[in-house]
């Protein structure tokens, strides 16, 4: 759970940086980010973790299991969140930017006070979905020898409590994710209230 | 004409092109303090582009613009500073939808000019009162009509204490009864001595508010005249043709 928290936080940060780079069409960097996004979205997290945990040591970089997990989650989540933010950014019309400029705001201030708050309102549902998705993806952490829910459940399974443990597993995930989902839902309504409707 | 010695805004041989199309083909214009200039002309004649060039939303290709003697179209211009002196209101009465009326207005004065919120707020309130919208200070843009939004947009620009205001077809997307309330605000500003450049299709309003009328067509200034002369007896054939668009012959039904 702690891993998921850090993973989500860092994904949100990485995603924002990537989205801004693509939004501003910074040469070269935007191409690299584009490739990163395709790579991260189109390969399974399990493979990415394998690479981090078993592949990197061969290149002389030994990462702890939990570091691998956070890096892996961030790598994957950053790509999804970048696309979510970008969707929000491009939804803010060009004239909003011009009006911001016309009252003397500097480009960065336009981004901060005009574009970003509106972009966030648009991006939030997709950011929520990604966050929940990331929490669920923690179920593959067992492959890097971390004790996640799945790992514990597998132990129980081996001891012969198959149906009960499965049920327990589902309930546990729900217990973790539902509150997260509700919190994001509340946030969305809050941002929406002031949101679009011109 | 209200003229003083030095032009507040001086435009010399301004050229602007988009890709291969030349939109402005050498515009010259001096604007004097307190003057109200109305720019009219058919769609696509370059009048909106002209206004956008004046506050740097469109880079120009050649020529120059001076504000109080300072060239503002040279590279390295601090447009943030210039735009505080040249306010602009647009056709799409766009407020920032995520901010209420007061915060829309205060964004510029507090973030750009670094003014105290309480002091800027007092000024905003007095402006809102003048445009009859004080009770809407806490409303969000989506709760306002088009005319109300446009009046807020005007106040938002005015609170930066600009020396010149540019109005780009500010009533073009409003319902007729809302057009009036916005034009009345502008008439009052003109009476108050604000220097204004107005692009509009409201000919009756142009006639009432203008000190000078400028007629543009295909990227040129075709005619500069007093409003009386321009609307009653224009010098050029093209202006005459343009004005005829706004005239209707009486309908004589065939029996």
Image (cartoon, coloured by chain):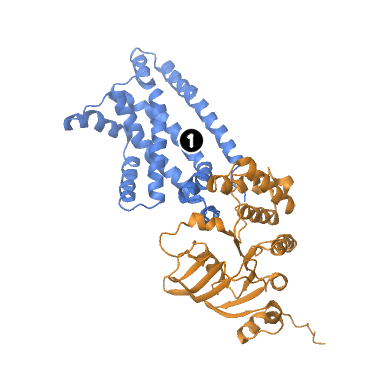
Chain colours: A blue, B orange
Would residue A155 be found to the left or right of residue B153 on screen?
left
Residue A65 appears in the picture as rendered: yes
Residue A132 quadrant? top left
Residue B163 quadrant? bottom right
- Secondary-structure class at tag 1: helix
Residue A17 position within the rendered picture, expressed as x and y whole percent measured from the top left = 39, 42
Would residue B251 be found to the left or right of residue B60 on screen?
right
Toward the viewer: A92 or B214? B214
Task: Name the residue at 55% across, 54% down.
Answer: A103
Task: Name the residue at 61% across, 46% down.
Answer: B106
Name the residue at the front extreme.
B5
Toward the viewer: B252 or B108? B108
Above or below, A64 against B48 in this view is above
Toward the viewer: B243 or B13? B13
Toward the viewer: A184 or A117? A117
Tag 1: Cα neighbours inside 10 Å, few (<14), some, or many (≥20)? many
**The C terminus of chain B lies in quadrant:** bottom right
Residue A134 position within the rendered picture, expressed as x and y whole percent measured from the top left = 41, 32
Q: How many marks?
A: 1
Task: Name the residue at 54% across, 72% down.
Answer: B46
Q: Which residue is mark 1?
A: A128
Residue A31 position within the rendered picture, expressed as x and y whole percent measured from the top left = 31, 50
**The N terminus of chain B lies in quadrant:** bottom right
């Amino acid at each position: 759970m702690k891993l998921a928290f850090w993973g989500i936080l860092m994904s949100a940060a990485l995603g924002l940086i990537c989205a801004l780079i693509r939004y501003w069409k910074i040469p070269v960097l935007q191409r690299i980010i584009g490739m990163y996004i395709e790579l991260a979205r189109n390969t399974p997290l399990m493979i990415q973790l394998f690479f981090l945990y078993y592949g990197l040591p061969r290149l002389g970089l030994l990462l702890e299991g939990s570091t691998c997990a956070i890096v892996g989650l961030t790598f994957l989540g950053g790509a999804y969140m970048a696309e979510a933010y970008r969707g929000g950014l491009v939804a803010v019309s060009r004239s909003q930017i011009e009006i911001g400029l016309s009252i003397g705001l500097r480009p960065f201030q336009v981004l901060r006070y005009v574009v970003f708050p509106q972009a966030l309102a648009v991006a939030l549902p997709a950011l929520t979905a990604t966050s929940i998705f990331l929490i669920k993806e923690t179920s593959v952490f067992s492959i890097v020898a971390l004790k996640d829910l799945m790992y514990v459940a597998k132990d129980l399974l081996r001891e012969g409590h198959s149906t009960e443990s499965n049920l327990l597993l589902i309930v546990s995930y729900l217990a973790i994710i539902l509150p997260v989902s509700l919190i994001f839902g509340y946030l969305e309504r809050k941002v929406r209230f002031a949101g679009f409707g011109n | 004409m209200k003229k003083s010695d030095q032009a507040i805004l001086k435009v010399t041989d301004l050229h602007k092109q988009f890709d291969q199309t030349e939109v402005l083909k050498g515009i010259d214009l001096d604007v004097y303090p307190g003057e109200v200039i109305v720019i009219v002309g058919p769609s696509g004649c370059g009048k909106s582009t002209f206004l956008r060039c004046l506050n740097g939303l469109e880079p120009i290709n050649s020529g120059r613009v001076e504000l109080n003697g300072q060239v503002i179209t040279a590279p390295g211009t601090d447009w943030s500073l210039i735009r505080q002196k040249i306010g602009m209101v647009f056709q799409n009465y766009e407020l920032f939808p995520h901010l209420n009326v007061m915060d829309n207005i205060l964004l510029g004065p507090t973030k750009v000019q670094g003014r105290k919120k309480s002091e800027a707020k007092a000024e905003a309130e007095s402006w809102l009162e003048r445009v009859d919208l004080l009770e809407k200070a806490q409303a969000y843009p989506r709760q306002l009509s088009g005319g109300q939004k446009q009046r807020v947009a005007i106040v938002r620009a005015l609170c930066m204490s600009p020396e010149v205001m540019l109005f780009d077809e500010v009533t073009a997307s409003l319902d007729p009864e809302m057009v009036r309330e916005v034009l009345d605000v502008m008439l009052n500003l003109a009476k108050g001595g604000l220097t204004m450049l107005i692009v509009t299709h409201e000919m009756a309003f142009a006639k009432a508010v203008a000190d000078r009328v400028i007629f543009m067509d295909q990227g040129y200034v075709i005619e500069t005249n007093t409003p009386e002369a321009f609307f009653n007896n224009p010098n050029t054939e093209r202006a005459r043709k343009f004005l005829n668009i706004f005239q209707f012959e009486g309908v004589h039904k065939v029996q």
